[in-house]
Amino acid sequence: MGKRYKIVFEKKACIGAAACAAVAPEYWEMQEDGKAHLIGSSTDEDGREILVIDEEHLGEKLKAALDENVEAAQVCPVQVIHVYDEESGKKLV
Ligand code: SF4
């Protein structure tokens, strides 16, 4: 099994600043309700959007995908985007 990273988006706390969509448009888009949407994600019972990106599906593109989402998390003014290394459980951002 290759590397896997989990992106967790606390959508309820999103203030719609759109910084995520500006730096990572392949993964983040703005919705009509003014909040961001993590493209391809599923929603958990707490309304958080979750997406796993992995080496199995993305191959060499995983590093770029990880970098994009880490950057999205870093530019979010209210820090509602988090990225975890699934292997170690470590929170990257
Ligand atoms: S940058 Fe943060 S607050 Fe702004 S739209 Fe994206 S997730 Fe929401």
Image (spheres, rainbow, N blue to C red):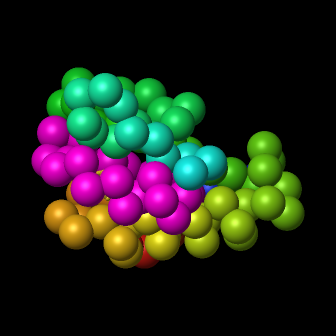
The quadrant where residue 11 appears: top left
Q: Position of residue 46 (x, y in %)?
A: 19, 31
Question: Is 58 left or right of 12, judged from the image as shown?
Answer: right
Residue at (70% x, 67% y) in the render = 64
Question: Is 31 left or right of 70, judged from the image as shown?
Answer: left
Q: Is residue 18 visible?
A: yes
Q: Does the magenta segment cover residue 55?
A: no
Question: Is 88 left or right of 32, judged from the image as shown?
Answer: right
Q: Nearer the viewer, residue 23 or 86?
A: 23
Q: How many marks?
A: 0
Image quadrant holding the C terminus, namely: bottom left
Magenta-tinted stretch = 5-24
Q: Nearer the viewer, residue 47 or 33?
A: 33
Q: Is residue 2 visible?
A: no
Residue at (76% x, 55% y) in the render = 55
Q: Position of residue 69 (x, y in %)?
A: 51, 62
Question: Is 28 left or right of 13, judged from the image as shown?
Answer: right
Residue at (60% x, 71% y) in the render = 67
The quadrant where residue 34 appears: top left
Q: Does the magenta segment cover residue 14?
A: yes
Ligand 1, seen in the image, is in the quarter at bottom left
Residue at (44% x, 28% y) in the render = 42
Q: Position of residue 2 (x, y in %)?
A: 75, 58
